[in-house]
Image (cartoon, grey):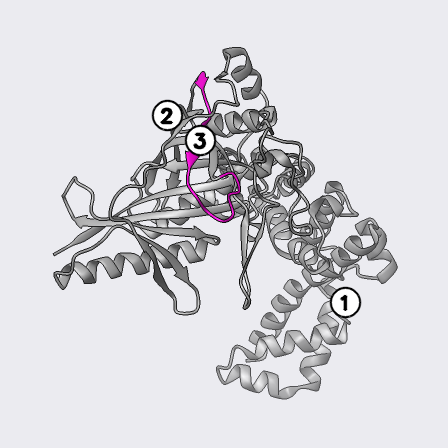
Amino acid sequence: MKYEAVIGLEVHAEVLTNTKAFCSCTTEFGGRPNTHVCPVCLGLPGALPKINKEVIEKTIKAGLALNCKINKHNRFDRKNYFYPDTSKNYQITQDEFPICTDGYIEIETKDGVKKKIGIERIHMEEDAGKQLHTRTGTLVDFNRCGAPLMEIVTKPDIKTPEEATLYLTKLRSILFSLGVSDVKMEEGSLRCDGNISIREKGEKGLGVKSEIKNMNSFKALEKALSYEYDRQVNALEKDEALRVETRRWDEETQSTKLMRTKEELSDYRFFPEGDLPPLYISDEWINSIRKTIKELPYEKEERFIKDYDLPKYDAMVLTQNDAMAVFFEETAKENKDYKSISNWLMGDISRLLNESNKKVEDLKFKAKDLSELIDLINSSKISSAAGKKVLEEMFSLGKQPMDIVKEKGLIQDSDEDSILLEVLKVLDENPNIEEEYSGGRVNIVGFAVGQIMKATRGKANPKIVNKLVRQELEKRK
């Protein structure tokens, strides 16, 4: 029997604001436990919440970028449940009237198939605190209580773990580009719950789902969904009944582990949040936010492929970072060798930035300097190897390429007459090269080229050296 997975994702993204959703406490990550709190986020008697306008604007901005309908009439609700890290015993969220609905993200699989993943809703809510488990007991840190979240819920449109990862990757890049969340999974500002069930291929109904909680990396999400698919298939093939379960991913055992079963739906007793007024979102407000949305990464990626004839991989890498994309386009105004610009940015420049823990914005040289370096190499004035040395000097000192070339004597010799003299000298001093070449060992050419480059201290044009060596050896056959 053949099965297929039905997957839906619930993503919690912390909204990038200086203060919490309903009070003026800082949202700064870390800090001593229980120091970023006040009577409002602790839910003390008499404390009244106040809506952070920036949370609403950034959630609307995300909704517009994700092709959602923005609902003009909104309200906040109380979701009632007891949990140690929720001091009020309820969470302020949105139930019946979420701010955004009916959106989608289009993904493209490795086979080039494009598919829309529907977004059921985006709603605003506050975060809970954090439990710290120790050998002597469990401690609670309320610093994160009240941090603003947007929860983005997909429709059950995802069929494979690969699609889930593609969706989450694209969602993360969009949210980061918009500036609505810093999406730092390692700090918990982007968390994902995965819901998965299986059914026979061709069926329309949904199977018994498992919810995998708090995935904090793309790789873990893909592994967890793959494991859970196999676990459910094996259970059905053994005629074992599946239960609605909440599970977690165990990195050590590379498997999902049972947290709790759900025999029936939880009754959260949702009711309107009486301390906050209903929200009305006007068309004018929506349109003013729409105007702030710049070109999104996937739109820029498509444009880079079309306008600069770049491979898809290059376009994807360059557009993941706004500063990198800007630097590429500034260089492209100076130089039409777009592929070389891309190669330098993705290769040596990215390596140097990573090694020094710096950003593109920290580069000491300008786009015109990179363009000049590429021209020096393309015109054979310097070799590619010399170009790497020049770049390192540009990176560390900010000097202009030609100044570095002159200081270090890196001008490449392309005079065929002078290079031929060196070729003849090396061949005469190494008669074995001629013998081995005549005997059919053509790769001895590489050895000969290396000896000539060594003799010229790397200044000879290697293409010309290679050509002259082959010509001379053919003559001597």
Any part of residue 304 in sight: no
The percent coordinates of residue 233 (x first, y second) are 20, 58
Q: Secondary structure at mark 3?
A: strand
> Which of the image's four quarters has the N terminus?
bottom left
Circle 2: is it few (<14), some (14-19), or many (20+) Cα within 10 Å?
Answer: some
Q: Which residue is mark 1?
A: 418
Q: Is residue 251 left or right of residue 54?
A: left
Q: Is residue 155 left or right of residue 350?
A: left
Q: Amino acid at mark 3?
A: Arg
Any part of residue 259 in sight: yes
Q: Nearer the viewer, mark 1 or mark 3?
A: 3
The percent coordinates of residue 54 (x first, y second) are 60, 26
Structural distance between the alpha carbons of marks 1 and 2: 82 Å
| 237 or 438, nearer to the observer | 237
Magenta stretch secondary structure, dominant: loop
Q: Which mark is residue 78?
A: 3
- Looking at the rendering, which quadrant does residue 423 occupy? bottom right
Q: Amino acid at mark 1?
A: Ser
Q: Nearer the viewer, mark 2 or mark 3?
A: 3
Q: Amino acid at mark 2?
A: Glu
